C-alpha cells in the first residue's frame, strides 16, 4: 500500500506491506533506530512515538495507519540543543542502559505539555505505561519534575 505521511517534520512516501508494524517501518525503512522494540505487545513502552502529537505504541500500529498523519520520533525531540526533558534525564541520572529512555521521553513530552506543573503522583501515573529495569524510577520522577520547572 502507498502511504504519505509526515515523519519528524519531513514528508515521507513509501510502499509498505499492509502488515508492516509502524515500529519496523520507522526502524528498517526510515532508519530511525531511536524507536526501540522491546516486548512487541504494547506493554513496555520502549517503542512509543507520537502520532498527531499523541503518544502511541508503534509496535501496536500498522505503518499504513499513519497515512495522512504526522509522526514524531525521539530523533526530533532535540532541536539543535537537548530538549529540557532530555537535559533533565541526563542531569538526574534518570537512565542507565538507555533502552527504555526514548519511549519515556516520547510519552512524557506530551504529558508535560498538558501538565506544566505536575505533582509527583501525576508523574508516577504518567510513567505507568513505560517499563525500566535499571533505574528504579526515582531519578526519572525527579527528572520530569525538574523539566517541568524549566522555563520554555
Image (cartoon, grey):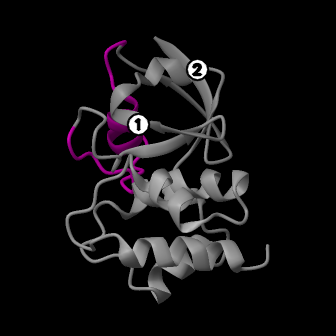
Measured from the top left, where is residue 100 in percent x and y? 32, 60
Placement of 89 over or under 34, stated as above or below: below
**How many other residues sit within 10 Å of disc 1, few (<14), some (14-19) or many (≥20)?**
many
Asked whether 147 or 8 is in front, the reply is 147
Q: Residues within 10 Å of mark 2 (few under 14, many from 20)?
A: some
Which mark is on residue 67?
2
What kind of secondary structure does the magenta stretch mostly adopt? loop
Q: Quadrant of the C terminus?
A: bottom right
105 in relation to 66, above or below: below
The picture quadrant where one finds residue 24 is top left
Q: Is residue 34 visible?
A: yes
Q: The magenta stretch spans which residues?
A: 18-39
Residue 42 rendering spot, x and y as whole percentages: 31, 35
Judged from this view, the residue extending furthest toward the right is 152
For image coordinates 52% across by 50% down, the residue present is 73
Q: Residue shown at 61%/53% (left/top)?
A: 111
Using the image as rendered, state which of residue 130 and residue 119 is in the foreground: 119
Vertical comparison of 30 with 121: above or below: above
Which mark, residue 57?
Answer: 1
Please indicate whether residue 100 sits to the left or right of residue 148 in the image: left
Judge whether residue 82 can be spotted in this image.
no
Asked if residue 72 is among those painted magenta in the image, a careful observer would answer no
Q: Nearer the viewer, residue 8 or 122?
A: 122
Pick whichever, 75 or 134, lies toward us.
134
The secondary structure type at the circle numbered 2 is: loop
Point 47% across, 18% down: residue: 64
Residue 27 inside the magenta-drawn segment = yes
Q: Looking at the rendering, in which quadrant would you find the N terminus? A: top left
Residue in the picture at 40% in, 79% down: 139
Toward which corner of the image does residue 147 lie, by quadrant? Answer: bottom right
User: Residue reaching furthest bottom?
Assistant: 91
Q: Position of residue 40 (x, y in %)?
A: 23, 35
Amino acid at each position: 500500500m502507498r502511504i504519505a505521511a509526515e515523519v519528524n517534520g519531513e514528508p515521507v512516501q513509501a510502499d509498505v506491506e499492509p502488515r508492516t508494524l509502524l515500529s519496523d517501518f520507522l526502524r528498517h525503512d526510515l532508519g530511525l533506530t531511536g524507536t526501540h522494540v522491546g516486548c512487541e505487545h504494547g506493554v513496555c513502552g520502549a517503542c512509543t512515538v507520537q502520532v498527531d502529537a499523541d503518544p502511541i505504541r508503534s509496535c501496536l500500529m500498522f505503518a499504513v495507519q499513519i497515512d495522512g498523519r504526522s509522526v514524531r520520533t525521539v530523533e526530533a525531540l532535540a532541536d539543535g540543543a537537548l530538549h529540557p526533558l532530555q537535559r533533565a534525564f541526563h542531569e538526574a541520572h534518570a537512565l542507565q542502559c538507555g533502552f527504555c529512555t526514548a519511549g519515556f521521553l516520547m510519552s512524557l513530552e506530551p504529558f508535560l505539555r498538558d501538565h506544566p506543573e505536575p505533582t509527583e503522583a501525576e508523574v508516577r501515573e504518567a510513567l505507568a505505561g513505560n517499563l525500566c529495569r535499571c533505574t528504579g524510577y526515582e531519578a526519572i520522577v525527579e527528572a520530569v519534575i525538574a523539566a517541568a520547572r524549566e522555563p520554555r
